[in-house]
Image: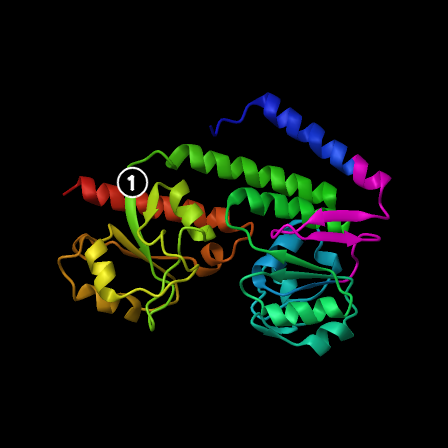
Amino acid sequence: MFEISSRAVQTSFQAVCFLVGSAAAAATHVAVKDDLGNDIRLERPARRIVSLSPHTTELLYAAGAGAHVVGVSNHSNYPPAARQVVSVGNTGAVDIEKILMLKPDLIIAWHSGNAAGQLQRLRAFGLPVFESEPTDYATIASSLERLGMLSGSLAAASLAAASFRMRWQALASTYHARAPVSVFYQIWEQPLMTLNGKHMVSSVLRTCGGRNLFADMPQLAPGVSIESVIAADPDVILAPDGAGERTFARWRRFTKMKAVMRSNLLTVHADWLNRPGPRILDATEQVCVLLDTVRHRSAAR
């Protein structure tokens, strides 16, 4: 399933060459679909792009479009060059006037993070809005290619996408069939919140042989009770780094929980895991190593 043959690599390279040639032949017209299936059409590749979330900023730079990014949301701190770009406000409440002053020809937004009303206002001004909502590795890879097409950097974007796919498949082939590990991923303490199976974090867990105990919850970021987590009795409790010791203090009181008994209260790099961009592969590698640690501790008992 995850094997990469030399023939597949050659086919991928030929496809990239075809796409690049096609893009060059029709350089004055660009058309792609965003993650919601909306058609995004430009008369020419975008030269002034505003990114409304940290993960879309990372995608744009990885796709070779960094030189055309003229505005970013707060907390767009990677790559370092993005820190020098004008901020247009917080993801949930961007500054529409400031965005308009930048005279963008393309907006890259986060579907579940940006306010729908604000995106409608931007569209009302005639601005094309690409909505990003990656929930799996394949969508991240194709996002690189689509953003490369929109910005005229398809050659660089295609290489980045091919590299992303190869590293993802290598990780998946190494870890996905290992013994399952049940996971509670805590994203917030008060109220206690997690992520469901449709979130990119669950794709990471599955790649590493992990099982999200609350995958079936209907909300993307549901609230859960302490009692429900205790009843589920996860093998490991994961939380973003930087959350502090207080994150795990409440769980240490429940000494009969497997995660507590086996010291499986572990943290992961928040920006890597919570942003569905290229660095999700760094998060995957980290999570896979952590889940292997949990397996070894279980085997040693």
Nearer to me, 246 or 211: 211
> Magenta segment: does it hold 42?
yes
Q: Position of residue 105 (x, y in %)?
A: 78, 62
Q: Position of residue 161 (x, y in %)?
A: 62, 41
Q: Is residue 222 above or below residue 100?
A: above
Q: Report which quarter residue 16 is drawn in.
A: top right
Looking at the rendering, the stretch of residues picked out in magenta corresponds to 21-48
Task: Please indicate whether residue 143 sits to the left or right of residue 214 in the image.
Answer: right
In the rendered image, which quarter contains the C terminus?
top left
Q: Amino acid at mark 1?
A: Pro
**Residue occupied by mark 1:** 180
Query: Tag 1: Cα neighbours inside 10 Å, few (<14), some, or many (≥20)?
Result: some
Q: Report which quarter residue 264 is drawn in.
A: bottom left
Residue at the extreme front? 218
Nearer to me, 144 or 192: 192
Q: Is residue 297 above or below residue 241?
A: above
Task: Please indicate whether residue 91 sits to the left or right of residue 184 in the image.
Answer: right
Task: Report how many numbered discs are placed on residues in the image.
Answer: 1
- What secondary structure is found at the residue carrying circle 1? loop
Residue shown at the point (24%, 68%) measured from the top left: 249
Q: Position of residue 20 (x, y in %)?
A: 77, 37
